[in-house]
Image (cartoon, grey):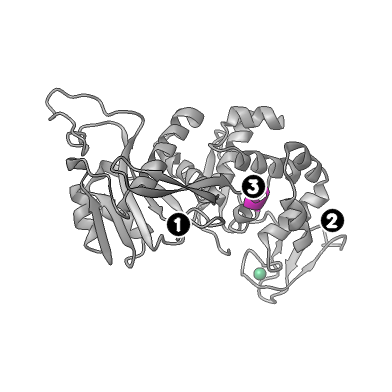
Amino acid sequence: MPEMLAALSSIRTVEEMIAAFRDEQHCRRLLESMVWPDGRICPACGFKRSIALADRDTGKRRARPSLYQCSSSVCRFQFTVTTHTPLHSTKLPLRIWLKAMWLLLQSDKGLSSVRLAEALGVSQPTAWRMGHALRLMVARENMLAGTVEIDHFHLGGRPRKNPDDPPPGRGRKGQTNTDKTPVMAMVQRPTDVMPGTLAGDARAAVVTGLSARASERVIEAQIESGAHLMSDEWKAFMAIGESFAKHETVKHSSGEYVRDAVHVNSVEGFNSRVRRTIAGVFHHISPQHADLYFHEIGFRWSQRVVTGNVIRKTRHGRESVRALWSRVPPALQLPNVFRAATGRQMRRSQDGGIVIKSAVAVFG
Ligand SMILES: [Zn+2]
């Protein structure tokens, strides 16, 4: 159904979006074309042939439209497009879901559940769960590669001052004694600065205790060993860098921030985006759900494209090329969200929260 997706990409305004997501059957077909871009796949076994059960008698009752049955003789699983996705067993119409996703993807920094609830006319807890459904679907498992900048920071403002600590210097010395959440951030640099180039993937993860070993575990799980790492000279990074093909550092301690292509400007930009988003949009996040918010912020970071370049002179009179970015239109982000929906499952918990049953996509 490529023409359906082509029509989707022509949506520019909220009004056009509401018109496009008016009809429930149309929304279902749209969702099918996004979740199954290469044809229906059984979510239970991955078999590529299935039959539509629409209006057939399945014994107890007439089959729902858009109910399918796996053609594998050993499976015969019955499914719809939302089976084994975060939208599984939803009571909300799909048109509300699509509007929610569109609104979330349209904003630069995300929407709080209060704002989303207002816009959709649903309850705040429902909007909160919808936000988490998006966060779960945009988690990515591919390893970062190429040139990858790494950095660490603390979430939730400056660490508490402790008179017994040495004064914090530029290299974040003396910040070990803190109750803030330590986070590791990783950003893959885009391959070039030509217009049309997508921003690289970006990841963040809570690192309990920020020990060298915990940091190493996080980094090695996310970055290919053939990657070219860039970081500051934090001690743990020096050790971690040895397991990668190449590692270059900037000496923040001696005031060095850029040495030709060696810098951590992208990851520092990502860090401040994470901090500003959490402080400005989500206010407080539980460490338990922090990774979900990081998935969303990282996905937003990656859904940008170079639109042009400006040449800027540095303080030392050298010229540097600075890329100008613009957000990928939400209608084009939607297929990227839903292609990784199958396999990621969450349920509503007894207390109205969420339980994540599986965070790994099976296809896509
Ligand atoms: Zn099957």
Q: Judge from the rendering whether residue 25 lies leftward or rightward of residue 139; answer left or right.
A: right
* Residue nearer the viewer, 37 or 186: 186
Q: Residue at x 27, y 44 (%)?
A: 257
Where does the magenta region start and end? 330-334
Q: SS class of the residue under badge 2? A: loop
The secondary structure making up most of the magenta span is helix
Q: Is residue 200 above or below residue 36?
A: above
**Mark drawn on residue 329:** 3
Q: Could you say where residue 244 lies in the image, as x and y percent from the top left?
A: 27, 64
Q: Is residue 268 above or below residue 223?
A: above
Which numbered marker is on residue 61?
A: 2
Q: Is residue 271 left or right of residue 348?
A: left
Q: Is residue 58 magenta?
A: no
Query: Is any atom of residue 187 visible in this view?
Result: yes
Q: Which mark is residue 156?
A: none
Mark found first going from the N terminus, 2 or 1: 2
- Quadrant of ligand 1 in image: bottom right
Badge 2 local density, few (<14 within 10 Å), some, or many (20+)? few
> Would you place residue 290 above or below residue 342 in this image?
above
Measured as percent of width and height from the top left, residue 217 is found at 29, 55
Amino acid under disc 3? Pro
Q: Which label's residue is closer to the chain start, 2 or 3?
A: 2
Is the CB of the residue bearing disc 1 within 8 angstroms of ligand 1?
A: no
Q: Report the disc number at residue 190.
A: 1
| Spot occupied by residue 88 in the image (x, y as percentages of width and height) | 65, 50
Can you give x and y, in whole percent of width and height, for residue 345 in the image?
Answer: 57, 52
| Front-most of residues 7 and 53 | 7
Q: Amino acid at mark 2?
A: Arg
Residue closer to the observer: 192 or 19: 192
